[in-house]
Image: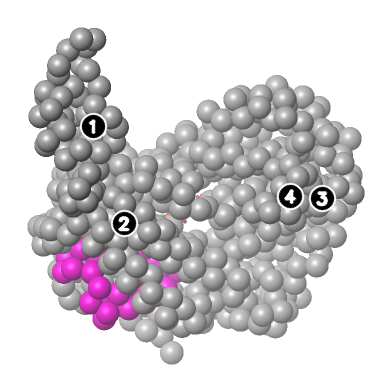
Amino acid sequence: MSVQLDSYLQGSWKAGEGDPRSLINPTTEATVATIRSVTRSLADAVAYGRETGGKSLRAMSFAERGAMLKGMAKALHEAREELIDIAIQNGGNTRGDAKFDIDGGISVLSHYAYLAKELGKDSKGNDKPWLIEDEPVEVYRGSKIRAEHILLPRHGLAVHINAFNFPAWGMMGKAAVALLAGMPVLCKPATSTAWLAHRMVQILVDAGLVPEGAFQLLMGSAGDLLDHLGPQDVVAFTGSQAVGLQIKTHANVIARGVRVNLEADSLNSVVIGPDVEEGTELFDLVIRDLAVEMTQKAGQKCTATRRVFVPEGAVDSIKEALFDRLDQIKIGDPSDKANRMGPLTSKRQLEDARAGVKTLSADAEILRGNPERSEGFAGVEAGTGYFLEPIVLLGKPDKVADPQAAFHQHEVFAPVSTLLPYDGELATAAKLIAMGNGSLVTTVYTDDRKWLAQAVAEMGPYLGRIVVANEKHAGASMAPGCVFPVANHGGPGRAGGGAELGGVHGMSLYMQRVAVQGGASQLARLLGK
Ligand code: NAP
C-alpha cells in the first residue's frame, strides 16, 4: 500500500501540484509513498510562519517553549514502534539504525527541553525574552558606561532543508533548537526518505502541541522558497556540498543577507597512535568503532569514518581484526532483527557509491568487498534492493601524502573506508588530516598524553569535534559518529563551515546578538540582574 504525503502549510494539509514522485522501499524496490511538490508560490507560507508562528512563539517564555519540546518528545516516543517500522520500510534501516535516528531526534528535543528550565530568567526568577551572554564590561578603562551582549529571537522563519539519511534526527535536531530560541520552522525533508518526517509532523499536528504556524512541512522540491526569504530569516541546510553551494550563492539569499548554516560533506578520520598495541582494550575499541562507523546506517552517516590513518607497522593487524569483525555483520533484509546492516536508501545512492569506489580505486586498492555484488543478502531476492557490502581500501603508498588523491577529495556515502599507512609521526598525521579540507569529526586513539595534546592543537582547527580515546576510558567510549546535543556539530571548509547543537551555543544561529551599551546601574536594572 502506498500513501500520499502532503505538505503542511499555513495551518492545513495541502496536496502539491507537481508530478508524483515515488518513495521506494530499498530492500524490495516497492513503492511505499508518493509526493507531489508544491509548484505554486511559497511566499504566503513564509509570511504565515514569520507572522503567525513567530508571534506565538515569542509570546511564550523559554520555559514554556521547553515544555512544548518536552511534549513533542513524549508524543513521538509514544509512536516509536510505528516510526521504527516506517524507517525500516522507507529508509532501509535496521531496527538499530531506526532507533539511532528516531531516539536521536527525541533526545535532542528532551535535551533542549531540559536546558530551557534555566534560560531567560532574571535574578528574581522573572521570565525575560532574551538570553544574556556575558557580564557587563567597561567600554574603556575607568568608564561608567558598560557593554553587555544579549541574544534575541530573530523575527523571521527558520527554513530547514535536510538530507536523506537522518529524516528524524535531522528534522528534530534543528527544530528543537530553533523553536526554543523562539523561531518558527519550515522543514523540507529530503524526498527519498520523507515518509518518516511526514509521519512525525502528523503526530505533532494531531497532538496540537505546537502553536499555529510554528511548524510547517514542505514535501518534495523547495520550489521558490529561497526567493521569499529576507534578513531576519535563517536557512539551515544539511546535504551535499554542491547543493549547499547553490543555496549559499542564491541571488536573493546574498542580496537580502539571509543567514545560512551549511552542514555538508566530510572526510572524517581516525588516527591510530603509534603506541596502540594488539591485545589491548584500546586496540579492540579501534576495531569496534571502525566496524560501527562503516556499517551503522550502511555507512550513510555524515560523521562516518572515511579515512583511517594506521601506523605502517600496524596495517596487517588492523586489517585482519577489522575484516574478522566485518565478517560477523550479517547483511540483509533490515526488517529481520538478525540482520545488522541493510541496503543503501536509494538506487541513486547505490550508483553514486559504486562510482565513488571506482574513483577511490584510482589511488587505492580494494582489500575487501565487491562493489558489484548483488546477491547473497539474507532474506532478499537476488538482484533486488540497493545493497552494498562493506568495502575496505588501502591507499597506494605514493598517494597517501598527495592532497589530490581521491580519498582526500571524495566522500563515498556508503560502507566504504580507506586505510592510509603513515609513519606514526604526529606532524605527518596532522598534515594528512588537513588534506580533507575540514571535517566534522576525527578520533585519536593513544595513551601518549604529549602526543595527544599536540594532536588536538594541530588537528583541531580542521575539525568540528575531536574524540580522544585511551585505554583507561576504552570501556566507556562511544563510537565517534554519535552526535550528542551537548557537543558542537559542524566543521570548517568542505564540511560547510557550519555549527549546530552544542547546547545553548546552537541557539545563537536563530538569535540576534545585540550589544546593549549604557550606564552600569541602568544595564543592571534593564537586564534584571
Ligand atoms: P542533497 O542531494 O544535497 O540534498 C539535501 C537536501 O537539499 C534535500 O532535502 C534536497 O531535496 C534538497 N535540495 C536539492 N536541491 C535543492 C535546491 N536547489 N534548493 C534547495 N534544496 C535543494 O544531499 P542528500 O543526498 O540528501 O544527502 C547526502 C549528503 O548529505 C552527503 O554528502 C552527506 O555528507 C551530507 N550530510 C551531511 C551532514 C552533516 O551534518 N554535515 C549530515 C547528513 C548528510 P530533494 O531530496 O527533494 O532533492
The disc, 1 or 2, on the residue closer to the chain's N-terminal end is 2
The disc, 4 or 2, on the residue closer to the chain's N-terminal end is 2
**Disc 2, SS:** loop
Q: Is residue 77 visible?
A: yes
Q: Is residue 198 left or right of residue 370?
A: left
Q: Amino acid at mark 4?
A: Ala
The residue wearing badge 4 is 474
Q: Are marks 1 and 4 in contact (CB under 8 Å)?
A: no
Q: Where does residue 263 sit, x and y in percent of width and height? A: 43, 46
Q: Are marks 1 and 3 in contact (CB under 8 Å)?
A: no
Q: Nearer the viewer, residue 507 or 213?
A: 507
Q: Amino acid at mark 2?
A: Lys
Q: Is residue 249 left or right of residue 404?
A: left
Where is 53 relative to 287, above or below?
A: below
The residue wearing badge 2 is 117
Q: Amino acid at mark 1?
A: His
Colouring method of the image:
one colour
Is 214 included in the stretch rendered in magenta?
A: yes
Q: Are marks 4 and 3 in contact (CB under 8 Å)?
A: yes
**Disc 3, SS:** helix
Question: Which numbered tag is attached to residue 281?
Answer: 3
The residue wearing badge 1 is 149
Quadrant containing ligand 1 reads bottom left
Tell me the residue at 32%/46% (across/down). Answer: 507
Q: Is residue 473 left or right of residue 131?
A: right
